[in-house]
Amino acid sequence: TFLYLVETINRSIGFDPKLKLFVGVLDIFGFECFKFNSFEQLCINFTNERLQQFFNTFVFKQEEALYKKEGIPWDPLDFPDNQDAVDLIQQKPSGIFAMLDEECLVVGGSDLGFVNKLKKQHQGNRRFDIIKQKQNWFIVNHFAGPVQYCVDQFLDKNKDQLSIDCVQVMQSSTNSFVQARFEDYNKKFGEGEGKKKKPVTLSSEFKEQLSELMQTVDKTDPH
C-alpha cells in the first residue's frame, strides 16, 4: 500500500522515471541510540553507516585534491573508514542481516539462538561486542559510537508476514482496490502452489532498496 501511495503521488506531480537530470536533497536522519534498541534501530543505523561511508569518500576526494593542489604530503591511511562496520551488518553469509535471515528459515529458530550464533561468529571483531549480564543483547560499534541492541522479536519483525488466512480474505474481497493490493503477495512472499521459493524478509528488502538508493547517490555530483 505504501508503494502504491508513492507511485500515485509521483504520477500526480508529473514525475518522469526516465528523467536523468534532477536535483535531490539527501535527508540523513541520524544515528539512533536509546535505552532500548531493536531491529528498527539496526536498520536505521545501517542506513547511516552507508551514508557515512559515502560522505567519508566524498570528503576524502576533496581533501586529496586540496592536498595535491597545495603540494602537501598525503597519507590516505589517516582517513577514517567504516567499511568493516558495513560488512558486519550486510556481508553474506556472516553479516548480521544474513544470519538473521538464516535463523528465520531454521525450524525452531529463536532470537536467543540467533544472538548466540552472532556471538560465536563475530568473536574478536572490533565492531562487535557482547554484554555478559544480558544474554539477549549485542553491541555494534558503529562509526558514530557503540549501540546496544536487544534481539527480542528480531525474527518476528524480520519475517513481517501476514497470516495466510488474512491474505486470502483480502484477495477474495469484492473491492477491486483491496484485491489489487494483495494480488502479488503470494509471488513475493513465497506462498501458494508449486515450488515454494525463499520468502522475502524485511532485512533483505531493506538492503535491496538501500543499495538502489546508494547506486543513485553514487551517480550524483554531491555538494
Image: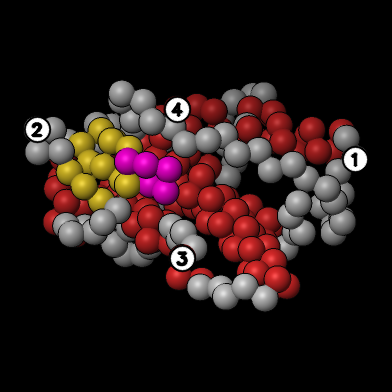
Q: Which residue is mark 2?
A: 133
Query: Within the magenta stretch, is there residue 144?
Result: yes
Q: Nearer the viewer, mark 1 or mark 3?
A: 3
Q: Which residue is mark 3?
A: 78
Mark with earlier residue (1, 4): 1
Q: Nearer the viewer, residue 136 or 160?
A: 136
Please, what is the three-letter code of the amino acid marked with disc 1? Gly
Residue at mark 2 to residue at mark 1: CA–CA distance: 55 Å
Q: Residues within 10 Å of mark 2 (few under 14, many from 20)?
A: few
Q: Position of residue 61 (x, y in %)?
A: 64, 66
Q: Nearer the viewer, mark 2 or mark 4?
A: 2
38 to 48, vertically: above or below: above
38 to 184, vertically: above or below: above
Q: Nearer the viewer, mark 2 or mark 3?
A: 3
Residue at mark 2 to residue at mark 3: CA–CA distance: 36 Å
Q: Main secondary structure of the magenta part?
A: strand
For the point 34% across and 57% down, the residue is 88
Mark with earlier residue (4, 3): 3
220 to 30, vertically: above or below: below
Please, what is the three-letter code of the amino acid marked with disc 4? Cys
Q: Is residue 188 visible?
A: no
Please, what is the three-letter code of the amino acid marked with disc 3? Asp
For the point 48% across and 32% down, the residue is 167
Magenta stretch: give its range: 142-146
User: Left or right: where does residue 184 sit relative to residue 149?
Assistant: right
User: Left or right: where does residue 62 sit relative to residue 43?
Assistant: right
Residue at mark 1 to residue at mark 3: CA–CA distance: 46 Å
Q: Nearer the viewer, mark 1 or mark 4?
A: 1
Q: Which residue is mark 1?
A: 14
